Amino acid sequence: MTIGWGILGAAKFAAEHMAPAIHAAQGAELVALATSSPDKAAPFQAFCPKLRLHDSYEALLADPAIDAVYIPLPNHLHLEWSLKAIAAGKHVLTEKPMTMAAPEFDRLIAARDAAGLLVAEAYMIVHHPQWIKARDLIALGAIGRLEHVDTAFSYDNRADPGNIRNRPETGGGGIRDIGVYTYGSVRFAAGAEPLQLEARLRRENGVDTWAQVVGEMAGPMGRFTYSAMTSMRLIARQEVVFQGETGLLRLTAPFNAGLFGEATIELHRKGALAEILRFPAVNQYVLQVEAFGRSLRDGVPFGCPLEFSKGTQAMIDTIFSVATEI
């Protein structure tokens, strides 16, 4: 069974990452793109010359050759078009954040269940072997009882004020763009949920450009402290460290591993030399598309169900509600 994919909107991210991933994935075919600007289709047609173009999102959703839709629209449009795609009978993979508030996920879950479709957020890291191994090491007690987690993700886009991430009306800001990784990744790897959170943030033109979150989380191994920093105004940085009673895990390039080639986990344990676990370069976007296909064909649970995404969005909602602006 080959899954026919359509993409709503000619987003740069889709052209650079997800469209090539769909084109390359086993069991997937990139069939169509919806855009009102045909010139924006050129980067897609460069590697997929047979790509069919639709001049509206509605036309693509009506295309019988489309089984699944990928939605990389600005954040504030994700919920609307995800629901419209479900209503059109399409399976849906939507960029994060899939909604602007956690309660909105209930509408997606209800629509998914009523239609019997696969509907999910594009949270690619849960498909990468590096993160799956980190989760397994923590669960197996490789670093003892988890005591603290540090996360950081930053980049600098101040030179691009028109970017949707710098615009409040499109749901911009660093927390929604990259906080989903510094928050959701810990929930995934440690099976944990926040108990208490505090936050400080800075805003420019109505969007958060820097945020620091500290607090306490709890999972199967008990309670641990937590800190996260996100920024759209600092030099590029990605880091995650899981500190246990008897060791620690440090992940290199934890959120864009495919852009940096080989990914590693440094495993440090008391009384032992550091172990470097190496993961050959893989395209985590291809892995995501193939995992989506396996879920459709074989019923294999998808790595990022809506219920998980709702939990991360609830954490984001809490952070905004408790944050102090500085």
Image (cartoon, helix red, strand yellow):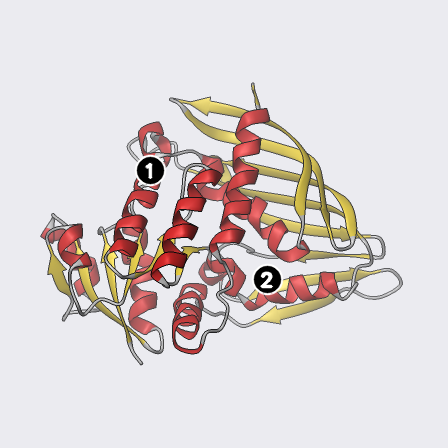
Q: Report the quarter where the N terminus lies.
A: bottom left
> What residue is shown at x 53% (from left), y 52% (from top)?
308
Q: Position of residue 163 (x, y in %)?
A: 31, 36
The answer to whether residue 305 is seen in the rendering is yes
Q: Quickly name the residue at label 2.
A: 131
Q: Is residue 140 above or below residue 123?
A: below
Q: Amino acid at mark 2?
A: Trp
Q: In the image, which disc is placed on residue 76?
A: 1
Q: Position of residue 136 (x, y in %)?
A: 68, 66
The answer to whether residue 97 is seen in the rendering is no
The kind of secondary structure element at disc 2 is: helix
Q: Is residue 18 above or below residue 180?
A: below
Crowd class of label 2 (few under 14; some 14 to 19; many from 20; radius 10 Å): many
Q: Is residue 233 above or below residue 34?
A: above
Q: Residue furthest right?
A: 271
Q: Nearer the viewer, residue 169 or 44?
A: 169
Q: Residue furthest front?
A: 114
Q: Is residue 247 left or right of residue 315?
A: right
